[in-house]
Structure formats: C-alpha cells, structure tokens
Image (tube, helix red, strand yellow):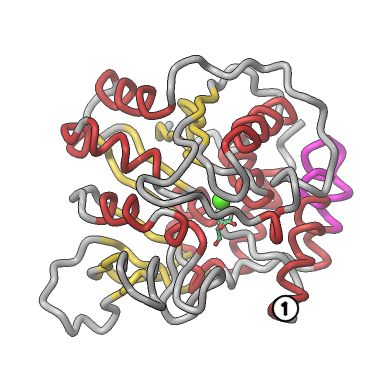
Amino acid sequence: AQKIIIDTDPGQDDAVAILLALASPELEVLGITAVAGNVPLALTERNARKILELAGRRDIPVHAGCAAPLSRPLVTAEHVHGRTGLDGIELPEPSLPLQTEHAVDFLIRTLHCQPAGSVTLVPIGPLTNIAEALRRDPSIAARIGRIVLMGGAYFEVGNITPAAEFNIFVDPEAAQVVFAAGVPLVVLPLDATHQALTSRDWVARMRALPGRCGPAVASWTDFFERFDREKYGSLGAPLHDPCTIAWLLRPDLFEGRQINVEIETRGEFTTGMTVADWWRVSDRPANALFIRSLDRGGLFDLLGSRLARLP
Ligand code: BDR
Ligand code: CA
C-alpha cells in the first residue's frame, strides 16, 4: 500500500477525505497531523480524533502541529464549517489520546525512518506544518515521495478573498516554502474542487448506508452545503479535500498540466493567490501538476463505493 500522512484542519470535507483514505486498501495512513485552519488547533486535533474513532481506527496516531501560521495571525472559517469546525452531527468526545510528539517532529522522524521516496504527504489545510518541517530539516525534501495538496485557485479565483483560496491565504509564506521545495507537487485547486459538488441523490445514498460513517458524511455535507448555496447559489457541497485522496486512487479521473505555480505573499489585493502559468508564458520552471477538471460522476461513484465499506 502507498504510505500517506494526512495533514489536516477538520473541517467536514477534511473528514470525508480522511474516511475515504481509511476505506481504501491501496493506502496506508501512517498518521494524521493537525494544523490550525478552519478552526483553532485545539478543535482540529480533537476533530481528527473524533473522525478516527467514528471509523473505528484507534490504531492511527494523531499529532497536533502548529497553532498559528509562520508569520501572520490565524484566520479561521467558522462561517463555513461552524463553531466546532465539524458542525452537522454531534460526535462523542474522543477517548483516543493525542500523541505527545509535535506534528512537525513526527513528520521529520517518519520521513527519515521510512525508505526515501516512499511517503506521500497529503496536506488539506494551511501548509504551516509541512513548511515548518521543511524549514527545520531541509533534508526531508529529498525523502518525500510527493505532496498532493488541496489549495489554490486560478481561473475560478478565490473563496476567502477575490484572489485567494482559504488554505493558501491563511499561510502564504508556508505555501511559498512548499512550492519552492523541489518536491513533486500535485495541486487540487478550487478550479477542480468546485466541480466536486454533491448531489441530492448521492447524499441520500450516504444517509441510507447501514453503518455510522455514511449518515455522518450525509450530515456533514448537508451542513457544509448551506454556505455554498447562500454564497454561490450552487446546489450541493464542494468536497474539496477528498479530491486529493481520490487523485491518489484514480488519477485518471483528473486532468491538469505540469506548470509553474508561484505564491503571492505581498500583494495588496492578491496575497495568497496561486499564480499559475497555465499558458506557459513565463520561463519559470514547472513545479506542480495543477489540476483543472475532474470526472464528477466517476469521483462520486468512487467515494460512494468506498465509504460504503466503513463501519
Ligand atoms: C479548503 O478550505 C477549507 O475550508 C476546506 O476544508 C478546504 O480544505 C477549501 O478552500
Ligand atoms: Ca481542509
């Protein structure tokens, strides 16, 4: 199985991404690292433990990481995810303990003890933990197999400012470190993830699943949908973060280009923008596979059949 570490700020769509990974035998989740993002760290690490308990996976360690971006105050998104970050269904307080090791130390240690190139990082929140690990120990760059992240937007532009997507906007300096690290990068921006809209049918199928995970996914997506309906008038909730895991399982469901992507950190109106050289008009070297579209039907078939395997 492909070894992965999910770095996350759950988040309803983060939760679905984690469940999709747990339901997929092609992937081995070595650990979950929590970061501040949608809500503060104390909530994201707890939400991660709740999700693992829901899935009956107390064997996976959860490590708490950075409580704030590298050099800015934290911006959160309770307006999208609710007060707990995981509103939609009340889950019991987790009894699964939080690891004492900091997420950054866990990342560095794991990358050194696993064979070089064998671990894929899947960041689905702000990139603070990953950047901090790269800064503290630059030698890990050569040991990371690949980074498959949810973040950024170009043609579709922003969801937190007119120019920026939330994960990149929260910590653009961290994003800059990651995009410049020379590690193979796959980027799932809003351009792709806004196509991953749930349908009424699909949510009803999840709600009808016999286990406890399916109905939880239905409740989360119902809650999450409210924001997009009010904001964009769209029907359905965009399952941003699960696109990363889906890409690992079925890259054939996605289309993109290997291009240069730079992070704006100083723009008056554009801080946090992912400047994607889609038309290759600069001579800057390609550093990312930037995904622009996906097969919605194929994605939701995959998600539905995988989530059905969970308890
Ligand atoms: C991203 O921001 C968060 O609110 C979601 O969980 C996702 O990772 C979408 O912009
Ligand atoms: Ca997220």
Residue 295 lies left or right of residue 57; in this view the side is: left
Say if the magenta span includes residue 72. no
Task: Name the residue at the left extreme.
Answer: 283
Rendered-image quadrant of the C terminus: top right
Image coordinates for residue 237, horizontal then vertical, percent: 71, 65
Q: Cβ(mark 1) to ligand 1 < 8 Å?
A: no
Q: Is residue 151 left or right of residue 279?
A: right
Q: Position of residue 49 (x, y in %)?
A: 65, 27
Which residue type carries mark 1? Ser
Q: Residue at x 75, y 52 (%)?
A: 82
Which stretch appears magenta? 204-218
Image quarter for ligand 1:
bottom right
Give x and y (percent) for residue 125.
50, 49
Q: Main secondary structure of the magenta part?
A: helix
Picture layout, residue 17 above or below residue 226: above
Height in image: 6 above or below 58?
A: below
* Lateral position of residue 211 relative to residue 44, left or right: right
Q: Is residue 204 left or right of residue 140?
A: right
Please state, as top left, top right, bottom left or bottom right, where the N terminus lies in the image.
top left
**Mark 1, residues whose alpha carbon is within 10 Å: few (<14), some, or many (≥20)?**
some
Q: Is residue 214 magenta?
A: yes
Q: Is residue 302 above or below residue 20?
A: below
Q: Residue at x 31, y 64 (%)?
A: 265
Q: Secondary structure at mark 1?
A: loop
Query: Which residue is disc 1 drawn over?
Result: 234
Residue drawn at (43%, 44%), measured in percent from left and top?
122
Q: Give the image location of residue 266, x and y in percent.
A: 30, 68
| Front in this rendered view, residue 298 or 13 | 13
